Amino acid sequence: MSEPILQVANLHVDFQTYGGVVQAVRGVSFDVCAGQTLAIVGESGCGKSVTVQSLMGLIPMPPGRIHQGSAHLRGHDILASKIIDGQDIRGSQISMIFQDPMTSLNPTMNIGSQIAETLEVHKGYSKSDAFARAIELLDMSKIPEAAKRAKQYPFEFSGGMLQRAMIAMAIACEPAILVADEPTTALDVTIQAQILDLLGDLQQETGMAIILITHDLGVVARMADEVMVMYAGEVVERGGVDDIFYRSGHPYTQGLRLAMPTNNQDTEANQTLVAIDGSPPDLFNPPRGCAYHPRCPYAMQVCAEQAPPTRTLGADHQAQCWLHHEMAGALPDGLVSASKVGQ
Amino acid sequence: MLKYFAKRIVLGLVTIWFIASATFFGMHAVPGDPLAGDKAMTAQIRANLEAKYGLDQPLGTQYLIYLGNIAQGDFGISFTQENRRVNDIIREHFPISATLGILAIVFAGLGGVLWGALTALYRNRWPDVVIMFLVILGISVPSFVVAAISQWSLVGLNLATGTAVLPIGGWGTVWHMLVPALVLGLSTMAYLTRLMRSSMLEVVSTDYIRTAKAKGLPATQIFSRHQLRNAILPVVTVLGPAIAGITTGGFVVEIVFAIPGLGRYFVQAIQQLDYTVIMGTTVFYGAFLVFMVILVDLVYGFIDPRVRVEK
Amino acid sequence: MSTSHLTPADFQPLQGSVSGQQISRPSLSYWADAWRRLQDNPRAMASMGLIAFLLAFVSVGPYLWQVDPSVQDLDQIGIGPGADRSVTLAPPFQPWLPEQQSTILADNAMGLTLTMPATTQAVRLMWARADGERYRLYRNLFDPSDTGSFGLPLAELDRSYFEDRLDLQAGTYFYSLVMLDANGAETATAITQTVNVTRVISVAEAIERGLIKTEAEAQLGQELKLAWHPLGTDYLGRDMLARLMYGGQVSLFIGIFAPLAFVLLGVIYGSVAGFLGGATDQAMMRFADFVVALPFLLFMILFKVIFGIGPGESGIWPMLVAMIILLWPAPARLVRGQILQIREEGYVSASRLLGGTTSYVVGRHMLPNTLGVILVTMTFQVPSAIFTEAFLSFIGMGVAPPTPSWGAMCNEGIKSMLTRPHELMFPALLISITVLAFNLLGDGLRDALDARMRGTE
C-alpha cells in the first residue's frame, strides 16, 4: 500500500448544547491513501458525517469543538487551519459532495458560475476561462449539452443532474481527496448506480482518494477498498471490503450485514432480514464499557464494565470487541476470530 | 414572463375598478345629498359639479360617467375650491410626496439590509443586541411621535448651536427632505431589519452555504455572492406593502413637518369634507399602490431566477 | 487499561441485555409544552405582566383615581407633572384705570415698567411715550435674546400702557416692547422686561373650588394648595392621569376587540372556503383578494367619512366596523391555507381511516393545529389596530372629542409639544409600551407554538 495522504489520529469532537455535552466523535483514527476508497459505515447519528465535516471545518464552532486529536494532509496539520501555503485546501486539496444536491447549490446562481467560482479562487482563472473549464467539467461528469446547462439554475436540473454538477464542482481543482457524504441517499436507485459509476470512473482517471460516507452496504460493496464501521462515535471494526463482508469480527457489523438484503441466491437463499433491536445510545451520556452492549445479543458482564481492546484479526483488519478475548468462550456463528483468518 | 405580467396588469386594472366602485358607492351611501349641504359652495362650483358628474342623472348613469372620467385619467374637480381640478392638485402636490417617499424607501431598504446583515453577523453579541433593541423601539413608537420628537430635537439642536443647522419644516432643498425622509422610513427600516436578520440566519444554515465553505471560498465572497443575495429575496417581496405603509405614513410626516405634499392636502380635504377630492385622491392612491405592487413583482422577477424563468 | 484482573465470570452472558424501545422523556401535550416554552421566555412573560398592568390601569384605575376626565381645572391649565400647586388668596379682580395712576417709570430705554406685582389675574405695564409714537407689544415664554424671537404679538398700541389678561399661567414671561415707524414697520428701538407671574385666586373662586369652606376663614395673602394632578393637565386643564385611563379604555378596546372580531370573521370565512373547496372556494377567495387590494388606511378614512360622526357620538363603533370590513381577508386566507394543508396531512388521513368522523377530525386535529397560528396572528394584529386608531385620531378621523383616546391625546399634545411636552409624551409612551408588549408576546407565542422552533433561539 502506498504512503497515506491523509492521516487522522484519535479525533474527538463534541457539541456544547443546552442539554449538555454531546460526544459525537470519540477517538477516531484512520489513514487515506491515493487512489483508494475508504468507506465509513454506520447508522444515523453514529458520528460518520461529523468526523469528515470536522476535518473540513464545516462544523459550526461553537457549539462544536475538536478537543483532541490530529489530522495531517501530506504532513501539514489541517485541524488548526485549513490554509496551507496561503491557500485554502478546501476545494483544491480536499473537496466534498453532499447528500442532498437539491439544496446544496445556490438557487440564485447558475451552475456554471458556481463551478467556475472554485477555479477563480484556487487557480486564479479569469471569469471566462473558468466558465469554459466549468463546461468541460460538466461534460466530463456526463451532463449532456453542457454549454447550455452551465447557464441554467439549480431548479432547472433533476436531482441526479445536480449531483453530477456537484461532482463536477468537486473535481474542478483536481483534489487529492474527494469526500462523498451519502452521495446517493437522496437519489433514485437507477440514478444511484450512474453516480457511483461516475465516481469510480473519475477516480480511475485522476487517481484521487475517495472517502465515502454511507449507511448503504450495497454502495460499500460496490465502491470501497477499505471499510471503517462506526458506532456511537467510535470505530468498532475496520478492514478491507472482503474482511468486513465475509470475515466480520464484530457483532454490530454482523448485525448490519444481516439487515441488508442481497440477491445472492446461492449462499443465502430464503434469507430473513434481521433488524438490530433497540436504538443508538444517548451521546449525552454514552454507556460505560462497550457502547454497543445494550443492543448486543452476545453481551457479557465485562462488556458493561470496560471498553473493549482493539484486536487485530488479520492484515489491516481490526475489531473492538471482548468476544475476541482469550477468556471469552467460543465465538458465535458468523463471527470470525483472529486464528480462523487463514482458513 | 411577459404573459405573466400582462395578466398581472389586467388583474391590477380590475382591482382599480373595484377600488373606484367601492369609493363611488361608499360615497353615495353618505346620508343626504352631500352637495346640498351648507358648505361654502358657490353657484359656479355647483354648476361645474353638476355638469361634471351628471348629478341630475340616475345613479347608474352617474356611475358610468364617473368610471368614464377615471378611465380617461380624470379624477374630478374640487368641491370647495372653485375650478380646481383634482388632477391639478395631484400634479402639484404628488411629486413632493413621491420625492419624500422614494427617499424614505431608499433609507428603509438600504438601512434594513445593512442593519439586518450586521445583526445576523454579530448574532447575540452587542451590536446585535443594541440594533435589535432600537428596532423594537422603532416598531413600537408611533410615527407621529418619532416625527414630533425629531422635530423637537431639531429645534433643540438649532437653539444649542445658535444657527439653523437643519430646517425644522417646510420644503425646498435637500436639507428639508433629510430628516422627514428618515423619520418616514424609520418604522419600515425597523421592520425590514428584523426580516433581513431572520432571513440571513436562515440562509447561513443552508446546505449551499456549507457547499460554498467546502469549496474553500473566502468568507467575504461567501457573504457577498451567496448569503446576501439569497437573504435579500424575502426583503424585496415585502417592499410592496412597505411602499403602501410609507405612502400613508407620509400623511403624518407631511403634517408634522409642514411639507406641502399630497398627503397633507388629502388630510386637509378630509377635514374639510371635500368629497370629490377625497374620492379622486383615494382612487389615485389606490391605483398608484396597485401598480407599485406590480412593479415590485417585476423587480423581484429580475432578482430571482426561479421567477424569471418559470413565468 | 488493565485487563489482568478479569475473571471468567466477567465473560458470562449479560441477562436481558437487549433493551427494547424506551421513552426517554415524559410526553407533554402540545399546549402544555407551548406553555412551558412560553414560560421559559423571559421577554414574553414580562410582556404578559405589562399587558396585565395596562389592563388593570384602564379598568381598575378609574376606581382608584376618581377624577372626571372631562372636568377642566381652569387654574391649572397645561401644567406638567409635579408642578407647584400653591396659590395665593387675593382680592377679586379690579379694573385698572391707568390714566388716574401716577407711576414712576423704570430707568430703561423706553421706561417699560411693571406697575404692580404680576399675578395670573393681570400683568400691567406702562412706559414712556412721546406724541405720535406707536408700539407693538410681544410676550414670550423664552428669553428673546436666546431664541431671537419676541414671541406672541399681543397688541399694537398708540398709548403708554397695557394690561395683559390673556391666558396667564404662573411662571416667567418676557414682555418686549418694540417701537414702530410711521409706516408701521418695527424699528430697532426695543426693550424686554422679565415678569414673574404668581398664581392668585379670589376668595369666591377658592370657595367654589372647595379649597376653603367659608369666607370667614379666608385671609388675603394666605397660601392654598390647588387640586393635585399627578401627571399634570392638558391644554384645557383636564387631568392627564384620568384621561390616560379613560383614553386607554378606548385604545385597548379597539386594539383588542377589532382583531378579535375580524380574525373570528376571517376564520369562519376561510374555513368555510377551505372546507367547501372547488368553485365556491375560488370565488370566495377571489373576492377576498379584492378586499385585500383596497388600500387599508385610505379606506378607513373613507369609511369614517361615510359613516360620519353624529353629535354626542364617540366614533368608536364606526372605527371598529370599518376595521372588521377591511381586515378580515388576511386571517381568512391564512386559515384557508392551513385547512387545505392540514387536510392533506397524513395524520388526518390516518384519523379518517381509523373511523374518525368529520366533526372529530375537525375538533381533534384541524382546529388545534390552526389555533396556534390564529392566536399568533391575533396577537400581532393588536399593535397594528392600536396604531390604526392612533393614526386616524392623529389626522382627526378617529374618536370624536371630547372622548379621550391615546391617539387623540397625542394629536392634541403635539400642538404644544415645545412648551408642554408631557401632553404628548404620556399617551405616546403608553401606546409604545402597549405595542411593544403585544409584539414581544406575539414573538414569544410564535416561538412557543411553532413545534419546529424547538431548540432554536
Image (cartoon, coloured by chain):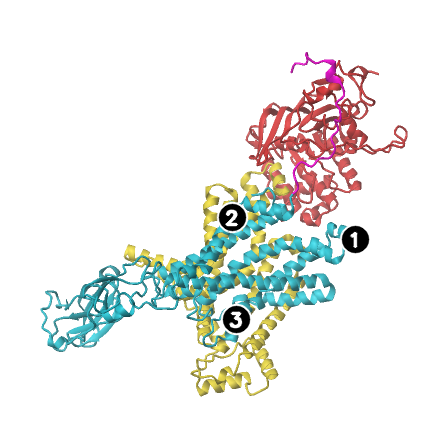
Chain colours: A red, B yellow, C cyan
Answer left or right for C7 relative to C388.
Answer: right
The vertical placement of A138 against B268, above or below, is above
Please say if the residues under marks 2 and 3 sit with CB atoms less than 8 Å apart.
no
Q: Residue at x 55, y 39 (%)?
A: B219
The vertical placement of A136 against B46, above or below, is above
Please state the extent of the stretch shown in magenta in the rendering: C1-27
The amino acid pointed to by label 2 is: Met
How many residues crowd mark 1 within 10 Å: few (<14), some (14–19), many (20+)? few
The amino acid pointed to by label 3 is: Pro
Q: Position of residue C123 (x, y in %)?
A: 20, 69
Q: CA distance from mark 2 to mark 3?
A: 34 Å
* Secondary structure state at the residue bearing disc 3: helix
Answer left or right for C95 relative to C405.
Answer: left
Q: Residue at x 60, y 39 (%)?
A: A120
Which residue was labeled with disc 3? C318
- For the C terminus of chain B, the image quarter is bottom right
Q: CA distance from mark 1 to mark 3?
A: 48 Å
Q: Earlier in the sequence, mark 2 or mark 1?
A: 2
Please say if the residues under marks 2 and 1 sit with CB atoms less than 8 Å apart.
no
Q: Nearer the viewer, residue A204 or C407?
A: C407
Which residue was labeled with disc 1? C355
Q: Earlier in the sequence, mark 2 or mark 3?
A: 2
Q: Residue at x 52, y 86 (%)?
A: B50
SS assignment for the magenta stretch, majority: loop
Nearer the observer: mark 2 or 3; the answer is: 2
The amino acid pointed to by label 1 is: Gly
The vertical placement of C8 against A128, above or below, is above
- The quadrant where residue B226 appears: top right
Q: Position of residue C125 (x, y in %)?
A: 17, 70
Chain assignment, label 1: C
Which residue was labeled with disc 2? C45
Same subunit under labels 2 and 1? yes
